[in-house]
Amino acid sequence: MTLNVYLSGEIHTDWRNQIIESCREQKLDIAFTSANTDHESSDAAGDVLGPEENGFWRDHKSAKVNAIRTKTLIEKSDVAIIRFGDKYKQWNAAFDAGYCAALGKPYITLHAEEIIHPLKEVDAAAMAWATTTDQVVEILKYVVNDL
Amino acid sequence: MTLNVYLSGEIHTDWRNQIIESCREQKLDIAFTSANTDHESSDAAGDVLGPEENGFWRDHKSAKVNAIRTKTLIEKSDVAIIRFGDKYKQWNAAFDAGYCAALGKPYITLHAEEIIHPLKEVDAAAMAWATTTDQVVEILKYVVNDL
Amino acid sequence: MTLNVYLSGEIHTDWRNQIIESCREQKLDIAFTSANTDHESSDAAGDVLGPEENGFWRDHKSAKVNAIRTKTLIEKSDVAIIRFGDKYKQWNAAFDAGYCAALGKPYITLHAEEIIHPLKEVDAAAMAWATTTDQVVEILKYVVNDL
Amino acid sequence: MTLNVYLSGEIHTDWRNQIIESCREQKLDIAFTSANTDHESSDAAGDVLGPEENGFWRDHKSAKVNAIRTKTLIEKSDVAIIRFGDKYKQWNAAFDAGYCAALGKPYITLHAEEIIHPLKEVDAAAMAWATTTDQVVEILKYVVNDL
Amino acid sequence: MTLNVYLSGEIHTDWRNQIIESCREQKLDIAFTSANTDHESSDAAGDVLGPEENGFWRDHKSAKVNAIRTKTLIEKSDVAIIRFGDKYKQWNAAFDAGYCAALGKPYITLHAEEIIHPLKEVDAAAMAWATTTDQVVEILKYVVNDL
Amino acid sequence: MTLNVYLSGEIHTDWRNQIIESCREQKLDIAFTSANTDHESSDAAGDVLGPEENGFWRDHKSAKVNAIRTKTLIEKSDVAIIRFGDKYKQWNAAFDAGYCAALGKPYITLHAEEIIHPLKEVDAAAMAWATTTDQVVEILKYVVNDL
Amino acid sequence: MTLNVYLSGEIHTDWRNQIIESCREQKLDIAFTSANTDHESSDAAGDVLGPEENGFWRDHKSAKVNAIRTKTLIEKSDVAIIRFGDKYKQWNAAFDAGYCAALGKPYITLHAEEIIHPLKEVDAAAMAWATTTDQVVEILKYVVNDL
Amino acid sequence: MTLNVYLSGEIHTDWRNQIIESCREQKLDIAFTSANTDHESSDAAGDVLGPEENGFWRDHKSAKVNAIRTKTLIEKSDVAIIRFGDKYKQWNAAFDAGYCAALGKPYITLHAEEIIHPLKEVDAAAMAWATTTDQVVEILKYVVNDL
């Protein structure tokens, strides 16, 4: 059985690769998916549908095109890892957490201790809170052990 | 038919009362609910269950007690209004938006133009984006007209 | 027990009132709801949120505001009546039929014999096809008899 | 991961093949399905069950046999493309859109600018509106990128 | 709290009235609903929609009109009582049992010992098997005690 | 795509084999499943769990063991074929039909014209009514065409 | 809005009354329901359906009759309180907890510190763990505050 | 078709291996999964996330990490076997049973006759009660026969 893991959130650090590489080295049977993590290309996802003068509608179109992908991948995943960095609003990560919570999809948060308080609702519905990618890998390894 | 509206998000300005009062004045048949909006009392919601030395667990207990209320009220609501102010992380508001989206529960966002870009995923799944409480009231009035 | 009946589709003839009036005269315990049936006001439902130069986005905003109402009412209804007239595209009526079908919500179509063929998929998932409002009333009367 | 895409709507132009061929040339990992797109054979789908004098029942039987296929394929798909041409009523396409909307299944509409207004409810629940098959292919390519 | 009880099956004996009367005498807070139990009127439920030469279609139309009522009432009920008599096929009663089973709706069967064997699948998914209306009343009384 | 077809009902004639063989000869990509169709072995399915003096409980145990299989297979199937012969009560077939109906699982009935009337509720929720196994095969062939 | 609270578990101490009385005194708008808490009458719930020589089947019949009540009440409740005492197996309480967890129904456990370890899976899915009925009342009071 | 079977409950005897080995010897197409059955490692599942002074929180973290695995595996299984031994509280096994019951997932209990009475609610929702692993294997063999 392959475990499907969706990686949500921060796109400015290397956390996704760290998790993926470490799991690969340990030959864990895990398939990772993710939103498009290239910021510019993600913001431009809807541009092919025609130009917009109004920034709101450009964002709207791109966000919906991205949602075709993220919604599908989250629903097909078994577990999500939701990462909050120390910068930016990252409301999409919290949105994904709420989406998972309503679906009963287990998720693990990955964030520093400094932001425990503002993330308390997100953490309250999580199955685990990790501060390092190594911890995430250890938990995933534990979950798929002997499967 | 009474429309059940859940008011989620920012607790530092008067937006809830503005909406509620305006709807009452116009005698709209709408019942409003909300999380506990008193910051200190909300943070202390779980304290009755015993003291915690570790801040994470104090937050955890309170967030879960609050979630008994919010989860129940969101699921019983017909529409949610989700407000983002200009301060703080407000991840709980984005979490509620994702929760609504996964349930297929319609929601309206209420926020300033400055934060369109970081809220694009949240707005993409919303039924409307408003910048003033008056706009929200107008939409609610339209929704319940003649019911 | 009150039966909740949603009236969807054509807004250019008097079919809604005929059904509602006839049921009232016979004192049937039925509550009727409907989308906003005023064409101009329906097209302008989103205008309060700000002007749009692009017709697509004006329509988009209004259609979503209308959907807050229609989605909520369809999901709360026990039965829908879906009316197709002899003019216009009326894709929203077919959309509502598909929405009901996926929810397992029973619906009755009301349309002339001339359009049987293009409506065959819509009728295939319906519980009945009526050609007159009197027939619809007779069926509703039968459904609520002795409740 | 193979993306399952259901192609719904117009059967009188070559749009399905354009999308399928272009995706194949680019080796995108996408599986396409569709209703029976042969008009005569589709209308005759139920004839094997015995002749009907009444046109309504012939249509009814064929539409239901077709629905065994379409309902199954839509529910198994990840995304639907819903095409509206410039002729005919095409209520089955709008029905499929409503069906997808109620299931929370993402769909993309494909239609000319001329019919924006009558399709506003259908577009309001869509994840994207495209006017050319190239745009559809670009979005699908974006969605499956790196999967 | 009122318990909603749906009475399904045999229409040729007085079992419904026996249960209803006994519950009323004991002032149990139970609301009973049922399909149309008048055989002729039930068979003619669809006749208002126009005559059919073919018996299959007459039955089809009536059965669907009846299903608007039964489907709605079963889904709104808390418990169903499903009665099998000693005559006729009564496939509609077994159909209702399967419908309840798939919904997770509890039901009680009411039938004589002679037909235990052919009803074993229906009884296997039931919460109780009763042979007399008095037993059914006792169980309902037990269920609503102190509510 | 393999179509999963569940074959429910009568076990005293050769209808299952006729359908399976004909589909195999035509190389249709269909996987068939079924309840245990050996009457004696089916009745004895629960005997391994210990003897019962009371016939009701022997039946009960066997019916539940059989239900582990049938419930699982019906839920995994895409379409069910439900066969009613001219003998016996066959309430389990009608139960399966109701189960499918509540799940929104499409099914085709297979029975002679003589029993149209008592099966009208079962047929009303079916996607097709066939009288011969050849008709069933033709429909299945149509459904999987080009998949 | 009345909050519906289901009280599950231990029947040998006075915890239910303590919670109910305290909430009444404080005029909290809460409706409490419960399984039959009279041990002997609960064990005999199915006896009206006829005697059983085999203890397993007597228990089976009674447990199912009780389940008609408990299943219905749990599904209608907004929150459950699940109490574990210091005696007996109380597997039904843990069963109710698992049932709530799968439904996404929030529950609060009420038990002494001594049994934290064997209850860790049950507590892991709970929204709160209380050790006294006063704590439960405080949380319920918090949840319904201002509703 | 591979049948997915989840093995829940007691970890102090060899029952899992007995079932798995016997099924392998008979070449039954069954895939077995299970929670982590190593007691110490299971209790320590969350330790990687950091030490806890408070026993409740250590248990809480480990139980949630374990739940990522068990919840996922139960939901992916077709049938669960739930074993109760003669020692310990085993509330997690009863919790799993309730979880399965709410999902409509069939399960078989495996326990001695001595604990029939306290397990009556758990057995009431089960599809079978077995006392030996051989009986479980026989039933599984029956379920997958000819698939």
Image: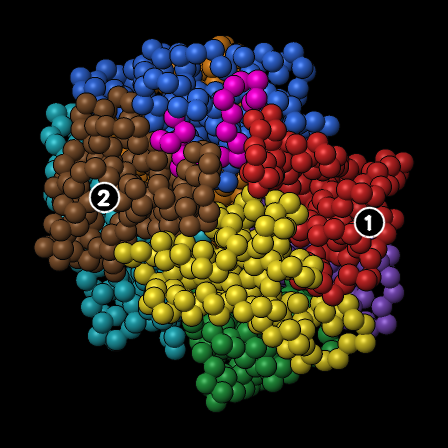
Chain colours: A green, B purple, C orange, D cyan, E blue, F brown, G red, H yellow
Number of numbered discs visible in the structure rendering: 2
Q: Is residue A128 shown left or right of residue E87?
A: right
Disc 2 secondary structure class: helix
Q: Disc 1 versus disc 2: distance between alpha carbons?
A: 56 Å
Amino acid on which disc 2 is placed: Asn
At x 83% / y 55%, what residue is drawn? G131
Q: Which mark is residue H103?
A: none
Does residue B67 lie above or below D48 as drawn?
below
Q: Position of residue G123 (x, y in %)?
A: 71, 60
Chain of the residue on which disc 1 is drawn: G
Report the span colored magenta: E115-136
User: Residue C27, position in %: x, y?
Assistant: 52, 11
The residue identified by callout 1 is G136
Residue E51, image x and y in percent? Answer: 23, 15
Q: Residue C111 magenta-drawn?
A: no
Residue at 64%, 41% in the rendered image: G74
Specify the quadrant that holds the C terminus of chain F.
bottom left
Residue bearing the label numbered 2 = D66
Decide: is D44 above or below H128: above
Q: Which residue occupies the foreground of this view, H90 or D147?
A: H90
Q: Specify the quadrant of the image occupied by residue F101.
A: top left
Q: Residue at x 25, y 37 (%)?
A: F10
Q: Is residue G45 above or below residue H129?
A: above
Report the amino acid beneath label 1. Val
Between E37 and C43, the residue placed more toward the observer is E37
